[in-house]
Amino acid sequence: MMHIPNIARPAKRSLSILFVAVAGLGLAGCDDSGGDPKMQIGANPELPKLQQYLIPPIRIAKAVGWGKDETPTVPQGLQIHALATGFQHPRSLYVLPNGDVLVVESNGPKAPIFRPKDVITGWVQWFAGAKAKDANRITLLRDTNGDGIPEVRSVFLDNLNSPFGVALVGHDLYVANTDGIVRYPYQEGQTSITAPGTKLTDLPGGPIDHHWTKTLIASPDGSKLYVGVGSNSNITENGIQAEYERAAVWEVDRASGAHRIFASGLRNPTGLAWEPESHKLWAVVNERDEIGPDLVPDYLTSVRDGGFYGWPYSYYGQHLDPRVEPQRPDLVAKAIVPDYALSSHVAPLGVAMYNDTELPANYRGGAFVGEHGSWDRTPLNGYKVVFVPFSGGQPSGPAQDVVTGFLDANNHARGRPVGLAVDRTGGLLIADDVGDTVWRVSSGSPSKPAS
Amino acid sequence: MQRHTGITGTTFISYANPTSTATPRGQPIHEMLTPFAAAYFTGAFVTDLAYWQTADVLWERFSIWLIVAGLVMAGLAIVAGVFDLASGRQINKPILPRALCYALAVLLSLINAFVHSRDGYTAVVPTGLTLSGLVVVIVLLMGLMGSTSAYRHHTGADT
């Protein structure tokens, strides 16, 4: 009997060696740092070789919120202040013709648990402050005297379903809930809408609804609505049938509600804007995860009618993604290379083309992009608002940091920028869904009166 | 020894001369738990094959849950094994080859759980499927190497 433990001991030792080996494999997955994001900004991003992980890197900024009197940082010549605080996960912004600002307070529907991994993802999101209760409402702010402090704050629309996009055409106000576009009657000066909405069209919603935000923009003539509909997965892990009419920009006829796919292969087009010079539609798009800290760069691109931009089969043109089976060489062959890379995992969730005069002249004609920030990359990337200069309807230079300081010295997130809008007087508004604040960036000259 | 007769019952085993070789200190608990993991891991190989053939994500989801369930049971078996050693319960020989095989199967399945947590086709093909297949081979080897304590040691037989 006494010899038994002696036999067992080598077995136990072997076990511990094996477990150390496993731990080592895991660490190897986490230890992988991304390169300089500057190499992935612009028309020709460096694209490293694709990697697949045992444990994909997770690097999130703990949400801590803003301290008293703390604000994001802006360069000289600009100033920033909180237009209003105390929101519940503000995601997007819309400015009405009379200057009233609509703040969409929203969060996604509860994600289903399909795999053990989904449980882990839930914890990660909670840690990052992304699990706030869905307020499902739109709040109106009115700054009558132009002093940058709203005198009126009211619940504009309530009981919505994970809303994101808003667009006004004449007296028709459209709200893009996660599962459909609803039209409400709106009269200028209204501070709340109590009239029931009318559904214009369904949009792809649950039960999975992986990318739930539906961004919305009206065509300049008001006849069409364009809707950004994100994919239902990272890379088709919920089945290709779950992606029906997703990862696309829809064109919805405003009169009939009929839709067609305007462009596809756009994994998660979260922001749409009209480029002021060429009058073309542009989008910010969130690309795929888990193939490396520098893959795949998120991007800003013009959206061509009938264009296919790669997802899920390929990225940046013809770079194949082996995680998709069966492949579609016919689609890959015509995949368009996006116009302008913003670097990897920055999560651009808002875009605003600036065509106003309040901010310094160098911002005129370019695009502001709200980068919500990375969760799967070391070092962190994004967590700022950048400016992409445009010339002749095309990006014309490297992106410049405009609003920073969302991360503190410990790399904790005081806030995270999401939707952007330009207000009636030309200030840049930023929704911050971790700081629960709407920030306003204006010209640095403090004496300048609001128009 | 009479107190052990209730554990497995004598009715399942009828040998000519049944004599229990289980120790007075009690039957090893971990041996009751180890087959669960083997069964779950084998199931995962079957669902992996189904995914490989159909590319239907439902099969991949079955696989990952089966692997995780197998790992949970293996974890319990390992805890029980440590307890058995510590409490001086009878560990059946030959322990070393079987323990190594078991450890290897669990290790490969742990790696496999991470592979199966990838998104898309490469969660299974080719690495996940290969690992699942290897684990089944190891489980079969273990089956050839030794059988249950009840069979070999006539646990539960009257002494």
Image (tube, coloured by chain):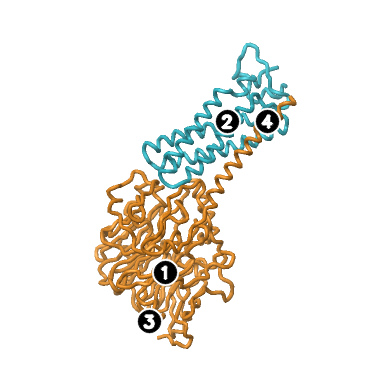
Chain painted in orange in the figure: A
Considering the image in quadrants, where does the C terminus of chain A appear?
A: bottom left
Is the residue B99 above or below the residue A414 in the image?
A: above
Image depth: mark 2 or mark 1 in front: 1
Are marks 2 and 4 in one subunit? no
Locate residue A106, reporting x and y percent.
45, 64
Q: CA distance from mark 3 to mark 1?
A: 20 Å
Residue with the mark numbered 4: A8
Residue with the mark numbered 1: A399
Q: Circle 2 — which element?
A: helix
Q: In terms of sequence position, does the residue under pointer 3 or pointer 1 come before the other? A: 3
Q: Give the chain letter at badge 1.
A: A
Taking depth in this image into account, of A316 and A264 the one nearest to the observer is A316
**Residue A141 badge:** none
Q: Circle 3 — which element?
A: loop
Locate residue A309, reporting x and y percent.
32, 56
Q: CA distance from mark 2 to mark 4?
A: 14 Å
What residue appears at the point 55 percent right and 25 percent down from the top-left corner?
B143
- Tell me, yes or no, whether the two marked residues, 2 and 3, touch with CB atoms within 8 Å: no
- Asked whether the viewer can see residue A259, the reply is yes
Are marks 2 and 1 in one subunit? no
Chain painted in cyan in the figure: B
**Residue A357 badge:** 3
Is the residue A3 above or below the residue A205 in the image?
A: above
- Hey, what amino acid is under mark 1? Ala
Q: 10 Å neighbourhood of mark 4: few (<14), some, or many (≥20)? A: some
**Residue B101 badge:** 2
Are marks 3 and 1 in one subunit? yes
- Hey, what amino acid is under mark 4? Ala
Q: 10 Å neighbourhood of mark 3: few (<14), some, or many (≥20)? A: some
What residue appears at the point 54 percent right and 65 percent down from the top-left corner?
A413
Q: Circle 1 — which element?
A: loop
